[in-house]
Amino acid sequence: MERLGWNPLRHPDRASGRMGEMSDIDGMGTERATCVLAPNPSAMTLDGTNTWIIGEPGAEEVVVVDPGPKDGAHLRRVVDIVASQGRHVGLVLLTHGHPDHAAGAEKFAGLAGHGGLGGSGGGRVKVRALDPRHRLGDEGLSEGDVITTGGLELRVMETPGHTDDSLTFWLPADRAVLTGDTVLGYGTTVLEGRLGDYLSSLDRLRAFSADRDAATILPGHGPKLDDPLAVLDHYIDHRRERLAQVEAAVAAGASTAREVVERVYADVDKSLWPAAEWSVQSQLDYLRTRD
């Protein structure tokens, strides 16, 4: 199984593996942010990857966050939507480097950079990311950066845990937090990074959202969430509860991630256990460093 990184575990309000209606997610957003849903649904990617078009009202230039997988029809659709608004893509940002978010970035940058396809006609659009391997151009992204393309204000926060290169973007004009896979529209994310980092990221996002009176979370998968504090409280509580379950499984004799999964995730489809093992391994590593 490819290491993509989402959590397949069921959400209390949805049946495990059930996909939402495309119309529920495609086109959702805020005044400045619009979702274009990629056609890659699965138990691991939920309804598909959310590509975000972000622009100031009336501005000719927009930012695209997470172009998505290398799916030509989806990438052209994003470009066409921007062109239909009489605008062009000025910059591409990546929340992290997983292929369902980033694999299409280079192709999209070429499509968006040709005037005949609705772009600016200036060649490939720049792609900025924390990890240099996913950039196009010399400029990366890091904590505290402020994106001002097309008159926007997008602030960059480093929120590792899901991956080491995970970023969150704050759109203050809409009081919206773009969380990538750090917080999902439903379910909880699989960890490829360190649990300690992830818990710190959640605590920081919770404090930040309270301080800035955040109105909505715009995730990398699933529907937008209009009660950020309740969502983040749930995420934090869930992680603490799951960690206690893992600790109990270890105390009962489990010594490997697989053995813990067999106890803690017994009610989950076994085909999804490999994904659960990634998160459990992060929890085991965290418990060892905490002792």
Image (spheres, rainbow, N blue to C red):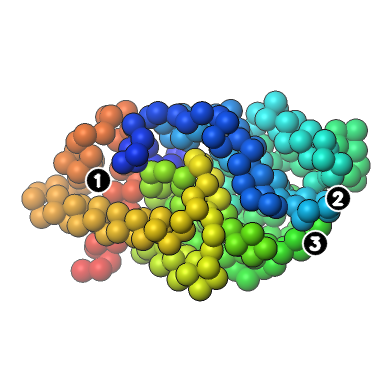
Q: Earlier in the sequence, mark 3 or mark 2?
A: 2
The amino acid on which the numbered mark 2 sits, given as a three-letter code, is Glu
* Quadrant assignment, res 68: top right
- Horizontal and vertical percent position of residue 244: 20, 57
- The amino acid sitting under disc 3 is Gly
Is residue 30 toward the left or the right of residue 10 in the image? right
Q: Element type at marker 3?
A: helix
How packed mark 3 is, by other alpha carbons closer than 10 Å (few <14, some 14-19, many 20 or more), is some
In the picture as drawn, the residue positioned furthest to the bottom comes out as 211
Location of residue 69 (image quadrant): top right
Query: Tags 2 and 1 in contact by the CB under 8 Å rule?
Result: no
Query: Which residue is under mark 1?
Result: 257
Whichever of callouts 1 and 3 sits on the residue coming sooner in the sequence is: 3
Residue 192: x and y in percent read: 42, 50
For disc 1, the neighbor class at 10 Å (few under 14, some 14 to 19, many from 20) is: many
- Mark drawn on residue 60: 2
Circle 3 is placed at which residue position? 151
Q: How dense is the environment of label 2, judged by Cα within 10 Å: few (below 14), some, or many (20 and up)? A: some
Q: CA distance from mark 3 to mark 2?
A: 10 Å
Q: Amino acid at mark 1?
A: Ala
Query: Is residue 176 depicted above or below 20 in this figure?
Result: below
| Residue 90 visible to an observer of this rendering | no
Rendered residue at 27%/29% (across/down): 270
Q: Residue shown at 60%/55% (left/top)?
A: 131
